Amino acid sequence: MRAFHSLRWSLIALAAFSLSAARAEDFRVEEVPSVTAVAPGQIKAKTILISDHADAKIRDEETGLIRFEDWAREKPLEKRYLSLFPDYAEPTIKVSVHGIEKPYTEKLHMYVVQARFLISKPAEAVDLGRFTNLDTLQALDPSINHKRIALDQARPNIDPQSAHNRNPARRWCEAPQSLCIESRYPLEGRIPVGIRLANKLEESGKKISESMDFQTEIRVLPQQEIDQADLAKLTKIDAPVVGVLEQALFDVNQVMQFGKLLAVVQPYPTDRTKSVVTVFMALGIETDVLQQKKEFANVPVLRNLIPVQVLMGRSSFNSGNSISAGLPSYVRNRIRAIAQLLDQ
């Protein structure tokens, strides 16, 4: 009987994804300089406005990303809501230098995305809670496998090496009605072959993993935690915030230190039969990873495996529709799937 139910849910998830993938084509992506500068009345139906263009004055021209300290200084409201917690700082870790442990600050670069789209139903009818269902998440991207974890399995809660990502307000996974998951994404296409070669050439040091492994907490914010004034400033829409979905990536095995997704639902200002959803996503990428060039550039077959090129989808090693496609493609596909699911 248990096997039957498992098969049943698997078939439901597959059907949901197939339906989502087919209909998601109805939503098209339109690139704009700034999503929050576009009024809801200018958004066309079945259109997702998206921007990942950092302000020129704080953008790192070489990577197209933003240094964490510049982001915190110039975009304090974004930093407050899109960090793991409001006072999050670049982590200080201990490294061994000639056998002596010394503190080292892990510098970060930020990849920040804004998206906005309309939903053809009232804001109160938009069901954010479905994203705290494991089957729904599996259907959004079947190439990533998820399993539930408890609060005593969340690494920052128990591992001193991950203490910098502990939430000072509470432990991860103890919020009511939250879903905590551990996820694994086996890198696709030619990337694993390149990683194996790179690991063979690297005689010492940390090896590159052929999978992305991460832990996240997903929850719908209770009304008492919604700061109406600040979130309206963040979205730049003068309308009450009806719902907020928050996904916090608090542990990842490589490349990144943290991630945050925030989806804010507000009523359409002049038509309450429709709603506006604004999605923000921020990923804290380790600067050391972005600076790994020489060891790849000196090996002809690995010249296109330079991490920043792969991450930003500018490498011949990129493939597929998930993380292996590069962050810009992955984020757009993920937001498109979210939009379609909310609009159903």
Image (cartoon, rainbow, N blue to C red):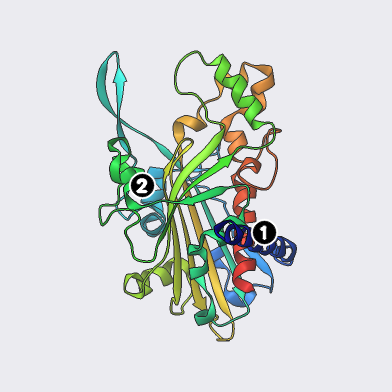
Number of marks drawn: 2
Say which residue appears at 44% left-offset and 69% top-offset: 244
Which amino acid type corresponds to the residue marked 1 in the rendered image? Answer: Leu
Q: Is mark 2 on a helix, strand or loop?
A: loop
Frontmost residue, 210 versus 205 = 210
Is residue 147 something that shows in the picture? yes
Q: In which quarter of the image is residue 105?
A: top left
Relative image position of residue 71 (x, y in whole percent): 41, 49
Relative to 152, residue 228 above or below: below
Relative image position of residue 76 (x, y in whole percent): 37, 56
Frontmost residue, 270 versus 54 = 270
- The mark found on residue 235 in the picture is none
* Viewport quadrant of the N terminus: bottom right
**Residue located beneath label 1 in the image:** 14
* Viewport quadrant of the C terminus: bottom right
Relative to 76, residue 45 above or below: below
Relative image position of residue 122 (x, y in whole percent): 55, 83
Tag 2–tag 1 contact (CB < 8 Å)? no
For marks 2 and 1, give the CA distance: 28 Å
Relative image position of residue 114 (x, y in whole percent): 54, 59
Q: In which quarter of the image is residue 343?
A: bottom right
**Residue located beneath label 2 in the image:** 154
Say which residue appears at 48% left-offset and 47% top-offset: 283
Q: Is mark 1 on a helix, strand or loop?
A: helix
Rate crowding at label 2 as few (under 14), some (14 to 19) or many (20 or more) other CA atoms within 10 Å. many
Is residue 64 something that shows in the picture? no
Please state which of the two labelled residues, at mark 2 or mark 1, is closer to the viewer: 1
Q: Is residue 250 left or right of residue 293?
A: left
Frontmost residue, 92 versus 57 = 92
Say which residue appears at 53% left-offset and 80% top-offset: 125
Q: Earlier in the sequence, mark 2 or mark 1?
A: 1
Which amino acid type corresponds to the residue marked 2 in the rendered image? Answer: Ala
